[in-house]
Amino acid sequence: MEEQNNDQLNIELSEEVAEGVYSNLAIITHSSSEFVVDFIRMMPGVPKAKVKSRIILTPEHAKRLLTALEDNIDKFEAANGRITMQKEPSNFLMNFGGAVGEA
C-alpha cells in the first residue's frame, strides 16, 4: 500500500492561466479586511486603460506576498544586478522611452 504525504499541495494550472496577462501598472487599494490589487495594461498614446486582472487578498496574505516579492527581488538582483527604476510623472502618463510618434 502506497503512503500519501498529506503536507503536499497539488496545484493545477490551466493553459489559459499559464499564458499570463501582461500588466505595466498596478493600483492597490485596501479596507480593514482586504487588499485589492488591480493589474492594468496601458498603451502609449491611448488615454484609456483596462484592468486586466484583479486580485483580492487578506491583509495577512498581502504581507506574505510583500515578503515573497522582496525575497525574489533580492535573489534576482544578486544574479542579474540591481533593478533601476525611472521616476514616473504623478498623472500616470507612461514614458515608453521613445519620441512621441516614433515607430
Image: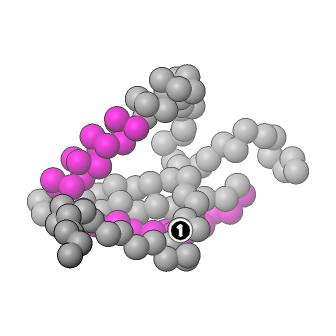
What is the magenta range?
45-72
Q: Is residue 76 visible?
A: yes
Vertical placement of residue 37 versus 64, above or below: below
Query: Is 79 colored magenta in this rendering?
Result: no
Q: Is residue 31 visible?
A: no
Q: Amino acid at mark 1?
A: Ala
Vertical placement of residue 10 versus 73, above or below: below
What residue sits right under mark 1 in the picture?
Answer: 18
Query: Is 62 colored magenta in this rendering?
Result: yes
How many marks the image carries: the answer is 1
The spot of residue 78 in percent (x, y) is 48, 23
Instruction: Please give the name of the residue rendered at 78% of the width and 40% of the height, measured from the top-left corner.
Output: 98
Instruction: Please give the name of the residue rendered at 49% of the width and 77% of the height, measured from the top-left corner.
Output: 14
The spot of residue 82 in percent (x, y) is 52, 23
Left or right relative to 78: residue 29: left
Q: Nearer the viewer, residue 43 or 79?
A: 79
Q: How is the image coloured?
A: one colour
Q: Residue furthest front?
A: 1
